[in-house]
């Protein structure tokens, strides 16, 4: 007889392994690696992983997608004889949905003391005033679930450092000719004029629309345009 351990295909350890498979798919898609499966009568009826970025939907958590898929399979919104396996403790949104569908059991891997709603930051799954309470099992394959999350966020931080500009790069860009702002221009009549304090018309002048400015009384500064041979105004004068 082989000395290899027998795999119990109906154990919490096995089902959490299937949730981890889903979490790894999220990791490959550059999503926060959380995976979930819903089991009923010893069989998996729904699988999902976090797809918030892929679907551009803040509600597309692994638990929410798995519950919706399970409802389709069961043909009812009530999942009273089902169990949810998820790699990270559900958030308040997901915990609220779990209560609404009347899940019997929730099994998760790693706790979330800051935002978890199954005993981490709060416990909505066993909240006294709610009309449904779930059995909660914590810490199944916790080390694997935690390592996957830690590796993901470590990679994200590394990518952020690579994308960040080197110190002093912004100063260099500001002083470079390529990043200089374009010259201001004015339009008198139908000709644009680069900003030149020695030549530009004063802001208080009024344009007549024919390329000449009308100056206030006593203002002897004329607009720097000259008549061309064909009678038009030469903007290069």
Image (cartoon, rainbow, N blue to C red):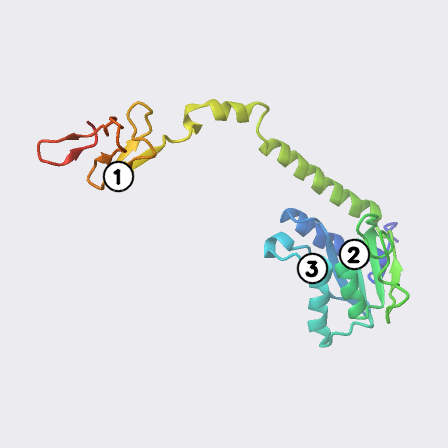
Vertical placement of 33 versus 157: above or below? below
The earlier-in-sequence mark between 3 and 1 is: 3
Q: Quadrant of residue 217?
A: top left
> Which of the pair 216/184 is nearer the observer?
216
Q: Is residue 43 visible?
A: no
Location of the C terminus by quadrant is top left
> Which of the pair 203/189 is nearer the observer?
203
SS for callout 2: loop
The earlier-in-sequence mark between 1 and 2 is: 2
Q: Nearer the viewer, mark 2 or mark 3?
A: 2
Left or right, 30 with reference to 15: left
- Quick one: which residue is furthest to the bottom in this view? 75
Left or right, 62 with reference to 29: right
Q: Which residue is mark 3?
A: 48
SS for callout 1: strand
Q: Is residue 127 visible?
A: yes
Vertical placement of 23 versus 42: above or below? above
- State yes or no: discs 2 and 3 in contact (Cβ < 8 Å): no
Q: Nearer the viewer, mark 1 or mark 2?
A: 1
Vertical placement of 80 versus 7: above or below? below
Q: Which residue is mark 1?
A: 207
Q: Picture coordinates of residue 204 (x, y %)?
A: 33, 35
Q: Quadrant of residue 9?
A: bottom right
Q: Quadrant of residue 22?
A: bottom right
Q: Which residue is mark 2?
A: 90
Mark number displayed over residue 49: none
Q: Picture coordinates of residue 222 (x, y %)?
A: 23, 28
Left or right, 107 with reference to 71: right
Q: Residue at x 13, y 36 (%)?
A: 232
Label 1 and label 2: CA atoms lie apart by: 68 Å
SS for callout 3: strand
């Amino acid at each position: 007889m082989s000395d290899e351990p027998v795999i119990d295909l109906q154990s919490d350890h096995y089902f959490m392994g299937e949730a981890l498979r889903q979490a790894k798919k999220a990791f490959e898609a550059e999503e926060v690696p959380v995976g979930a499966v819903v089991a009923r009568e010893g069989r998996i009826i729904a699988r999902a992983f976090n797809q918030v970025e892929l679907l551009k939907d803040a509600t597309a958590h692994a638990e929410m997608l798995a519950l919706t898929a399970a409802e389709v399979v069961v043909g009812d919104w009530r999942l009273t004889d089902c169990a949810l396996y998820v790699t990270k403790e559900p958030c308040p949104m997901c915990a609220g949905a779990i209560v609404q569908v009347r899940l019997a059991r929730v099994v998760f891997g790693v706790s979330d003391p800051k935002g978890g709603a199954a005993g981490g930051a709060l416990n909505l799954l066993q909240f006294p005033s709610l009309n449904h309470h779930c059995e909660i099992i914590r810490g199944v394959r916790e080390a694997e679930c935690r390592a996957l999350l830690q590796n993901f966020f470590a990679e994200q931080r590394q990518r952020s450092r690579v994308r960040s500009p080197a110190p002093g790069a912004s100063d260099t860009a500001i002083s470079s000719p390529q990043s200089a702002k374009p010259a201001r221009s004015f339009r008198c009549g139908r000709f644009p004029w680069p900003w030149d304090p020695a030549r530009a018309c004063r802001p208080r002048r009024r344009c007549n629309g024919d390329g000449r400015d009308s100056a206030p009384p006593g203002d002897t500064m004329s607009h720097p345009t000259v008549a061309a041979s064909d009678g038009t105004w030469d903007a290069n004068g």
